[in-house]
Image (cartoon, rainbow, N blue to C red):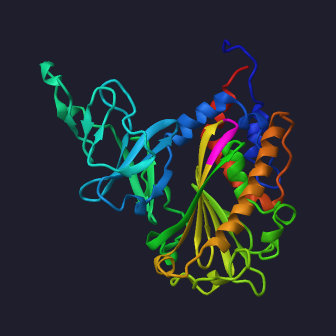
């Protein structure tokens, strides 16, 4: 189409998201379905943002690695001989073949299956068969392309942009969670879900409990959806607490802890669950005795993958009678209820009706939607039919 075509999105609808929550309206439906918006988000948000890709405990051994995808690009995260995690584009510097296919493992080196170029744990090119026949070939100039990697609370984050602010700067106004000892927690269980919905729908669903009384009876009996106080938002996050009901000590099938509370938390934390969304797709819930993390990976405009980790204190995981099933089954049921709701919202987005207003309980949804429009609204407004 030429530039004289009609706008794909009504600018007034985009601007309506930026109003105060009591006057704002939600995102236009096309933002959840349009392939050009999805491509724009990959470049403007996911290639320039800090994306959670795993835990430091995944790389506890020299040569241990993770193969992940960020903004549609293959990335290799590996522990060097010094155990320091590094990240590289998982792409051979010769003809661009993906070097590593396995999702995880331990390796002394990484050999491209196409022509045998071989890379060390630090990304250096170790071997390039017959390339000595190229007079000007310099192995030192052809190592794997590095990707920025930083750590927070035992989590690994990567960023494909050389110019984006560092993770510490990006999280400078993020709530202090030091009392939870996140780096010392250990993964007790991990589940990956495929969700038939756009990544934004998954994140919005996480950020409100207006739907909880109707959709999550097992949650609502333990924690009332109106409890905990008003949500809050910062430059790169939103969040808020919910209180546990009288007689309950955690979120689980029984509502009772089977392991002690996390040692460093405050007295008030023992009766609350804190929910936080670090943009774009890192979702963290902090219960008194465990932490649950959801990492959302956009796969297509109408499809996402959600990786869910349950983290407990290492001393709890080490107990012979440790069993996280009560917690995992509770969240698995809650997640599957949410994914069905997300699927229905995705189907409804195709109708592209005028979005409705936010309920005050959707303060955090509005904060995220506003952030999104601030990131890409001008470029979305330039899209033509």
Q: Establish if 35 lies above or below 221.
A: above
Placement of 211 over or under 290, stated as above or below? above
Q: Nearer the viewer, residue 162 or 181?
A: 181
The residue at the point 58 percent across, 74 percent down is 290
Q: Is residue 265 visible to the viewer in this orientation of the structure?
A: yes
| The magenta segment | 301-305
**Main SS of the magenta segment?**
strand
List x then y, in percent, for residue 327.
66, 72
Q: Is residue 23 left or right of residue 76?
A: right
Q: Is residue 303 magenta?
A: yes
Relative height, residue 383 to residue 160 (above, below): above
Q: Position of residue 64 (x, y in %)?
A: 35, 54
Asked if one can make out residue 225 in the rendered structure from this viewpoint, the answer is no
Q: Is residue 141 left or right of residue 354?
A: left
Place of residue 51 in the rendered image (x, y in percent of width and height, measured from the top left): 50, 49
Q: Nearer the viewer, residue 62 or 226?
A: 62
Who's the residue at 42% across and 59% down the image?
58
């Amino acid at each position: 189409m030429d530039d004289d075509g009609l706008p794909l999105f009504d600018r007034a609808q985009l601007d309506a998201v930026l109003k105060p929550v009591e006057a704002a309206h939600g995102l236009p439906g096309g933002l959840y379905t349009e392939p050009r918006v999805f491509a724009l988000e990959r470049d403007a948000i996911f290639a320039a943002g800090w994306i959670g890709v795993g835990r430091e405990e995944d790389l506890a051994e020299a040569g241990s690695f993770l193969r992940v995808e960020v903004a549609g690009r293959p990335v290799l995260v590996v522990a060097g001989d010094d155990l320091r995690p590094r990240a590289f584009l998982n792409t051979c510097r010769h003809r661009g073949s993906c070097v590593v296919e396995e999702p995880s493992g331990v390796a002394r080196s990484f050999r491209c299956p196409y022509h045998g170029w071989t890379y060390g744990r630090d990304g250096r090119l170790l071997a390039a068969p017959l390339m000595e026949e190229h007079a000007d070939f310099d192995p030192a100039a052809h190592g794997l392309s590095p990707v920025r990697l930083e750590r927070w609370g035992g989590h690994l984050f990567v960023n494909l942009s050389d110019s984006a602010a560092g993770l510490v700067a990006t999280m400078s106004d993020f709530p202090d969670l030091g009392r939870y000892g996140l780096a010392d927690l250990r993964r007790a269980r991990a589940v990956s879900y495929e969700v038939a919905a756009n990544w934004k729908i998954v994140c919005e669903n996480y950020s409100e409990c207006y739907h909880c009384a109707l959709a999550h009876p097992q949650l609502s009996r333990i924690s009332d959806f109106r409890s905990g106080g008003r949500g809050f938002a910062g430059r790169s996050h939103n969040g808020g607490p919910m209180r546990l009901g009288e007689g309950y000590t955690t979120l689980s099938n029984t509502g009772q802890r089977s392991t002690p509370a996390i040692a460093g938390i405050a007295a008030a934390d023992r009766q609350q669950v804190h929910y936080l969304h670090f943009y774009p797709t890192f979702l963290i819930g902090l219960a008194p005795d465990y932490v649950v993390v959801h990492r959302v990976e956009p796969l297509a405009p109408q499809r996402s993958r959600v990786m869910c980790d349950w983290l407990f204190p290492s001393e709890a995981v080490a107990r012979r009678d440790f069993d996280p099933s009560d917690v995992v089954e509770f969240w698995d049921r809650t997640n599957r209820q949410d994914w069905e709701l997300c699927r229905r919202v995705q189907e409804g987005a195709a109708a592209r009706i005028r979005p409705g207003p936010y309920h005050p309980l959707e303060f955090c949804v509005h904060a995220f939607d506003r952030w999104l429009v601030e990131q890409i609204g001008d470029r979305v407004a330039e899209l033509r039919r």
